[in-house]
Structures are given as structure tokens and as C-alpha cells.
Image (tube, grey):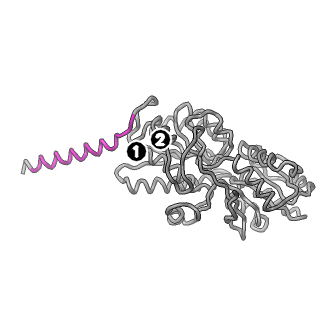
């Protein structure tokens, strides 16, 4: 009995030793030693509360789905999500970035979600060597800062802006266009690109502010311009109110064209279904129905709704970091090197980054508000 008992203890000890070895497979490099693989965290950085929370929550759902699927396959060594709720406000970003940096178990960040907060947090992440993959920040200049940790899993506004202008020219065939922006890093940057591409078709411009609620002056300018279409660069909260107030003012029908920051049911709710009807929304994101594998079905099963804007991109970004952890890369330097060398198919596209962190595979789709729902219209080549 004693020999058998000792044998059992020895065998059990061997199993524990193997498990411990598996959970301490992090590697080392110039940025420090790898963290315990079984305590690794992926950060989710974006608006989870506030006026733009809908966009951040959909991304979070994509990250959650990826992590849950990973944990199902690795039940003895799970990964967790660390949330950094920026509320979409750039002034919140530096402090949240430092909080993420200080948590040594955070090996990568999905986000920041918006361009303004990305600009504010990027220097800290770069200095700390903490890799980021944004699923939604589209300002082109973010890739020009020399941050070796910056990666973007979608096309930037140098792709989306010309696509929006092309839709206005070729599909709407609007001879005159009015352009409005919200003065944000994202909204103004995108509007400037659209204005450049439309050239002499732009007959007027105006700037509003984030959190503005009275757009009477802008409505008057749009109406006075005689333009049958207007482009808005900004987010869904302000876009919805502007669309509603423009419709309430009466007069000729004017088609609204906006971009990914407005592609959310919050826009339809704020504008009202009647006013929102026919609005065109561009996005460098793939419709859920076009995603690869079982992502669309898995998302709907888990959350009860179809994947919204950037849910698929959030899922893909998280899976890059999860692949690094699976491969035993748990130091920040090794994770960043893994991301830079990554080359595999995701749910939304083939994922491979260039030397500036931009993804090689790009797409832009137009969506249309129809009967209160945002539905796919056509890919803009």
C-alpha cells in the first residue's frame, strides 16, 4: 500500500510540475520577462459608457467572443479581458494607457477604438512597448507617428474618404454637396479627405462640436446651399440630432452621407426612423453576412443580435493576441514581434501588417438605412 501511495504522489507531482511548466512558458527579451501564461490579459480600450458607447460595446463583444472560444479550448489556462473605458474622450486616454501599462499581465491592447484617444494614448504605449491593434480608429496620420507598437486591422480614411466621395459622385450623382465635421480628430480628418476628393462639388462647409445638441445654424446653411446631399464627419449622437433637425425644418429632401462613426442603431434612434430613412453610411468593415467561418453565427448565438460595426474586427484583433499567447509569447516585446510577423486569415480579412502597422487587405462598404435598419448596400470598389 505504501509503495502504491508513493507512486500516486509521485505521479501527481509530475502532473503538477508539467502544468506549472505549461503556465510559465513566457519568454524573455529586452522589454522584460514574460508573464505567467495562465494570468495573461488582453486589454479592451474604448468607449463602454457615454455617448459613443454603442460602438465600443460591439467591439467588446467581438473580443469577448474570441476570448471565450479560446478559454473553452484552454480551460486549464485561461485568458481574461481588462477593460479600459475611455468614454471616447481623448483626455481620458493617457491615464487609462498608463493604467494598462502598469498591469504587467496585460500583453496587448485591442484599441484604442477612436482616433482622438489613439493619438493621445499612442506615445505611452509605444514607450512601454505594449502592442495595440485598433479595430476602428481610421485617421491616416496615426500610422505616421513612428510608433512601433501601432497596428490597424482595417483600412484608414485614405481608403474610406475617397470611397464616400465616389459613392456621392457615381451613385447619388449629386452635383452639389455640403460638408459638416465635428472638429474631432476622426471627423475633421475624414471630412477634409472627402472635401478634397469632391473638389468643386462642395458648395459649403460647417463645423459643429461633440456633445452639441442645437444644430439650427448648420441646418440653415445646408438648406441655403441648395445641395441635394450633405456629408457628415463625426459620430452617431450628433449625426442623429442633425439629421432630425434638418428633416424637421422641411424643404427639399437632402440625402445624408456619413461614415463608420455613424453606423450604429443609435443614429436611427436619435434621428427617428422617418428622418434616418435613406441615409448612406460608409465603413471599412465587412458586413456580418460576408465574414468567414462561423463568426456571424457564433456572435448571434452568444449575444442574440447580428454583429454590428467592428464586432468582426474586434474579434480578429483579439485572436491575433490569443495566437501569440498560445504560441508562448507573453513578454510585451515578443508579443509585438509576433503581431508584426502575423500572417493568417481572420473572420474579416487576411491579416498581415506592413511596416507602419497598416493591414494589407482593405475593403469599404456602403450601408443604407432602410425601414429603420442599417443594411448592406454595396461594396465601393
Marks 1 & 2, CB-CB < 8 Å contact: yes
> Residue at the location (53% across, 39% down)?
131
Comes first in the chain, label 1 or label 2:
1
Residue 30 to residue 327: above or below: above
> Residue at the location (59% across, 50% down)?
361
Q: Which residues are magenta?
A: 4-27
> Residue at the location (73% across, 50% down)?
161
**Total number of numbered discs in the rendering:** 2
Q: CA distance from mark 1 to mark 2?
A: 9 Å
Residue 139 percent location from the top left of the image: 68, 43
Viewed as shown, does residue 181 lie left or right of 132? right
The C terminus: image quadrant: bottom right
Question: How many other residues sit within 10 Å of disc 1, few (<14), some (14-19) or many (≥20)?
Answer: few
Q: Quadrant of residue 173?
A: bottom right
Q: Which mark is residue 336?
A: none
Q: Is residue 106 visible?
A: no
Label 1: element kind: loop
Residue highlighted by disc 1: 327
Residue highlighted by disc 2: 338
Q: Viewer-proximal residue, 284 or 40?
A: 284
Farthest bottom residue? 371
Amino acid at each position: 500500500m505504501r509503495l502504491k501511495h508513493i507512486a500516486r504522489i509521485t505521479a501527481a507531482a509530475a502532473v503538477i510540475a508539467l502544468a506549472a511548466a505549461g503556465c510559465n512558458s513566457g519568454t524573455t527579451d529586452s522589454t522584460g520577462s514574460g508573464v505567467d501564461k495562465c494570468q495573461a490579459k488582453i486589454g479592451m480600450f474604448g468607449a463602454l459608457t457615454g455617448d459613443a458607447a454603442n460602438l465600443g460595446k460591439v467591439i467588446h463583444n467581438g473580443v469577448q467572443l474570441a476570448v471565450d472560444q479560446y478559454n473553452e479550448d484552454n480551460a486549464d489556462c485561461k485568458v481574461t479581458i481588462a477593460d479600459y473605458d475611455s468614454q471616447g474622450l481623448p483626455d481620458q486616454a493617457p491615464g487609462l494607457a498608463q493604467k494598462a501599462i502598469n498591469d504587467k499581465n496585460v500583453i496587448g491592447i485591442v484599441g484604442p477604438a477612436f482616433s482622438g484617444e489613439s493619438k493621445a494614448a499612442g506615445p505611452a504605449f509605444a514607450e512601454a512597448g505594449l502592442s495595440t491593434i485598433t479595430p476602428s480608429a481610421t485617421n491616416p496620420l496615426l500610422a505616421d507617428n513612428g510608433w512601433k507598437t501601432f497596428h490597424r486591422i482595417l483600412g484608414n480614411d485614405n481608403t474610406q474618404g475617397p470611397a464616400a466621395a465616389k459613392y456621392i459622385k457615381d451613385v447619388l450623382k449629386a452635383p452639389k454637396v455640403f460638408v459638416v465635421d465635428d472638429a474631432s480628430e476622426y471627423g475633421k480628418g475624414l471630412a477634409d479627405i472627402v472635401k478634397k476628393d469632391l473638389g468643386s462639388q462642395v458648395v459649403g462647409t460647417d463645423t459643429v462640436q461633440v456633445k452639441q445638441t442645437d444644430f439650427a445654424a448648420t441646418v440653415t446653411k445646408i438648406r441655403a446651399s441648395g445641395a441635394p446631399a450633405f456629408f457628415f464627419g463625426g459620430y452617431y449622437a450628433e449625426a442623429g440630432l442633425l439629421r432630425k433637425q434638418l428633416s424637421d425644418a422641411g424643404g427639399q429632401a437632402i440625402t445624408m452621407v456619413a461614415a463608420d462613426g455613424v453606423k450604429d442603431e443609435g443614429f436611427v434612434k436619435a434621428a427617428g426612423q422617418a428622418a434616418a430613412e435613406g441615409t448612406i453610411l460608409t465603413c471599412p468593415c465587412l458586413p456580418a453576412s460576408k465574414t468567414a467561418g462561423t463568426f456571424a453565427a457564433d456572435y448571434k448565438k452568444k449575444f442574440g443580435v447580428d454583429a454590428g460595426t467592428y464586432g468582426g474586427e474586434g474579434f480578429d484583433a483579439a485572436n491575433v493576441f490569443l495566437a501569440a499567447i498560445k504560441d508562448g509569447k507573453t513578454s510585451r516585446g515578443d508579443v509585438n514581434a509576433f503581431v508584426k510577423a502575423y500572417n493568417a486569415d481572420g473572420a474579416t480579412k487576411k491579416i498581415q501588417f506592413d511596416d507602419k502597422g497598416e493591414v494589407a487587405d482593405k475593403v469599404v462598404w456602403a450601408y443604407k438605412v432602410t425601414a429603420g435598419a442599417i443594411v448592406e448596400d454595396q461594396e465601393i470598389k
